[in-house]
Image (cartoon, helix red, strand yellow):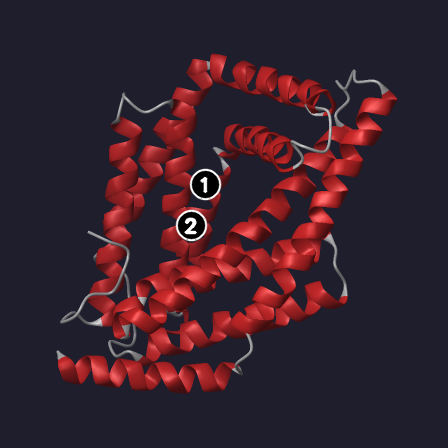
């Protein structure tokens, strides 16, 4: 099953189905012995993000249950984050080397990447800890799965999804303005989170008008990846500067940080025009359009 609301089902049933599917897939990934444990952690954390985005789409109709459910899947994912964070920094080093391949000596990046790979190997060698983390994750997801069927959703119409989409979009607009006015790691990270939620919502709602909503989904994905790369670079920069185990020469560190900052600035320049196009519409106008999409979709069904 794909991550979307389907024709012929209520929003209430659709959200419950989507959450159940993501939990079941995460449990399957934990049990899959063919998956590398680092890949397992990466996959199941994405499941939690999808679940939280689905909850956010009907936030208003969940009432007090939203805070509990959102915190549940947020905290479950956080407990297994350290391995994935290290993996992401290794991938960021690789992307940095690729981007500047013709311009700089890869020896500037190589020692940093080797130290990260050593850190990852050390984490993964502690198999007892990794297995315990995944067992705890599995137990928490089983508990969450039992609650899905009884999840209290006060509204069964598309109005709840429409309001959730509008609210998330509005926050993304505000986050974009803040990031453009004051470009810092924190403001761009906040914008990234809001863009990701909007992207997930476009995936959930894409069947309301497939050709149009899919195009919007694709642009949101492109922007989300840019902002995700920005976030990863900021995390990498902070780790390199603050890691007490650092043994690189000062010249190596200085040159590495310059590369990170140059690439970060490039991403900021690339993301702003894409963001301004994607979030050009006022939230109430976007909601009005999607209300028509929903209405026509319902009539077609």
Where does residue 251 sit, x and y in percent of width and height? 86, 23
| Residue at image mark 2 | 49
Q: Residues within 10 Å of mark 2 (few under 14, many from 20)?
A: some
Judged from the image, the secondary structure of the residue bearing numbered disc 1 is helix
Q: Is residue 55 above or below residue 263?
A: below
In-front residue for pair 167/294: 294
Q: Is residue 76 above or below residue 53?
A: above
Q: Residue at x 24, y 42 (%)?
A: 24
> Which marked residue is nearer to the observer: mark 2 or mark 1?
2
Q: Are marks 2 and 1 in contact (CB under 8 Å)?
A: yes
Q: Is residue 299 visible?
A: yes
In-front residue for pair 166/67: 166
As measured in the structure, the alpha-carbon distance from the residue carrying label 2 to the one carrying label 1 is 8 Å
Where does residue 152 sit, x and y in percent of width and height? 28, 66
Q: Residue at x 32, y 34 (%)?
A: 138
State left or right for residue 213 relative to residue 229.
Answer: left
Q: Quadrant of the C terminus?
A: bottom left
State left or right for residue 128 relative to residue 87.
Answer: left
Q: Residue at x 60, y 18 (%)?
A: 119
Q: Is residue 252 above or below residue 4?
A: above
| Residue at image mark 1 | 77
Judged from the image, the secondary structure of the residue bearing numbered disc 2 is helix
What is the number of the mark on residue 255?
A: none
State left or right for residue 254 relative to residue 31.
Answer: right
């Amino acid at each position: 099953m794909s991550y979307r609301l389907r024709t012929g089902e209520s929003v209430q049933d659709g959200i419950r189905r989507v959450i159940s599917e993501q939990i079941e897939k995460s449990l399957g990934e934990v049990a899959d012995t063919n998956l590398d444990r680092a890949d397992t952690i990466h996959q199941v954390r994405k499941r939690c993000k999808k679940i939280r985005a689905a909850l956010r789409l009907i936030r208003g109709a969940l009432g007090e249950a939203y805070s509990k459910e959102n915190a549940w899947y947020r905290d479950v994912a956080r407990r297994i984050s350290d391995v994935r964070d290290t993996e992401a920094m290794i991938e960021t080093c690789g992307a940095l080397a690729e981007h500047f391949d013709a311009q700089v000596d890869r020896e500037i990046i190589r020692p940093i990447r080797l130290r990260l790979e050593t850190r990852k190997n050390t984490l993964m060698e502690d198999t007892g800890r990794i297995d315990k983390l995944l067992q705890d994750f599995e137990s928490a997801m089983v508990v969450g799965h039992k609650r899905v069927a009884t999840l209290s959703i006060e509204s069964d119409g598309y109005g709840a999804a429409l309001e959730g989409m509008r609210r998330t979009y509005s926050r993304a607009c505000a986050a974009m303005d803040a990031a453009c006015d004051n470009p810092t790691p924190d403001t761009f990270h906040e914008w990234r989170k809001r863009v990701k939620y909007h992207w997930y919502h476009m995936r959930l709602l894409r069947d309301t008008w497939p050709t149009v909503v899919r195009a919007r989904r694709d642009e949101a994905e492109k922007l989300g990846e840019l902002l995700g790369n920005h976030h990863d670079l900021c995390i990498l920069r902070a780790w390199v500067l603050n890691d007490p185990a650092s043994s690189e020469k000062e010249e190596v560190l200085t040159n590495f940080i310059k590369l990170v900052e140059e690439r970060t600035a490039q991403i900021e320049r690339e993301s702003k025009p894409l963001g301004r196009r994607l979030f050009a519409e006022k939230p109430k106008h976007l909601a009005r359009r999607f209300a028509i999409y929903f209405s026509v979709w319902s009539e077609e069904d």
